[in-house]
Image (spheres, helix red, strand yellow):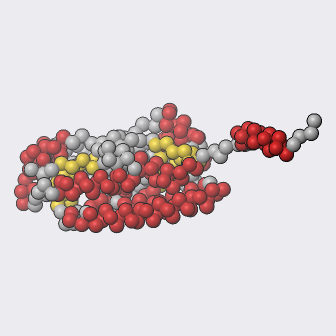
Amino acid sequence: MKTTTKQKSLALMLVAPVLLLALPAHAALRVLACEPEWGALAQELGGELVEVSVATSALQDPHQIQAKPSLIARARSADLVVCTGAELEIGWLPILLQQSGNAKVQEGQPGNFAAANFVRKLDVPGQLDRAQGDVHAAGNPHIQTDPRNIALVATALGARLQQVDPSHAGQYAQRLADFSQRWQQAMARWTAQAAPLKGAAVVSQHKAFVYLYDWLGLKEVAVLEPKPGVEPTASHLQEVLQALKSTPAKMTLYSAYQDSKASDWLSRNAGVPAVKIAFTVGGTEAAQDLYGLFDDTVNRLLAAGAKR
């Protein structure tokens, strides 16, 4: 029986989907991010080309993480580990990488990316003295509170994605260009919105916002922790309260992962609004991506500033 052209076409239509299913699917580049902001950035730059998991949540202190077996397993299978660096993860990341046995993501390898290496660090100590609390030799590691740093890290991370996954370099480059354009526009908007905050005196619960202050021109006049990472004592809080009588502040900032007890105490006793800052993606309901993180941060600061 002779097969007609129409029958051949029908047969091809039936077989084609089966052939497509048989083709090997692109294996996504596996990215393990230490903090939510870098997971969000990797997703922005990688899209469907990457499979991103995050080691910590916005409600965890990134200094205090355990290298649990489940986390070690994720590091073992990762193609790229993206962390802050600057000693933020010094208490757990070296152990995690060592126990993973994954040569690709060890320090010095292309699969190991430290975001803080690509920005200007603030609060770099003149001399290192651990008696001064949780002091980082490389400078303050909380670089993600300044969107200008996000832009710098994005450029470096985009290049690194192209390096570790060269077969998709063109797609990463295009996604980086698109993100950079949108991010520059967003930064201009945030900077304009936050202009009324310039010069405002603020109190920090933890020394976590120096990059945010540098960006917006805020002036830190007191810190509730007597030393970085050391819980404030009643006597120290009283000292801060007395100091604010001569140098009033507009607000006290604390991170979403922190207990707000000290900030709330100051709010009651000094009439200074306590402002919860998301600090990273997921820290508040509105901060569900990088854009929402800074939308929410600026909005909260403006709302608190309007109260005084």
Q: Would you say residue 277 is visible in this rendering?
A: yes
* Quadrant containing the N terminus in the rendered view: top right
* Lateral position of residue 203 relative to residue 103, left or right: left
- Percent x, y of residue 228: 27, 50
What is the total number of numbered labels drawn onto the structure image? 0
Q: Residue at x 50, y 32 (%)?
A: 69
Of residue 179 and residue 84, the one placed in the foreground of this image is 179
- Percent x, y of residue 184: 40, 66
Q: Residue at x 75, y 38 (%)?
A: 14
Of residue 91 and residue 8, the one placed in the foreground of this image is 8
* Lateral position of residue 139 relative to residue 270, left or right: right
- Percent x, y of residue 284: 31, 44
* Lateral position of residue 298 relative to residue 58, left or right: left
Of residue 248 and residue 183, the one placed in the foreground of this image is 183
- Percent x, y of residue 85: 44, 53
Is residue 290 positioned above or below 214 on the image? above
Quadrant position of residue 66: top left
Q: Residue at x 51, y 64 (%)?
A: 177
Is residue 142 positioned above or below 256 on the image? below
Quadrant position of residue 122: bottom left
Q: Residue furthest right?
A: 1
Q: Residue furthest top?
A: 69
* Quadrant containing the C terminus in the rendered view: bottom left
Q: Residue at x 8, y 46 (%)?
A: 269
Of residue 22 and residue 89, the one placed in the foreground of this image is 22
Q: Would you say residue 223 is visible in this rendering?
A: no
Is residue 225 positioned above or below 192 on the image? above
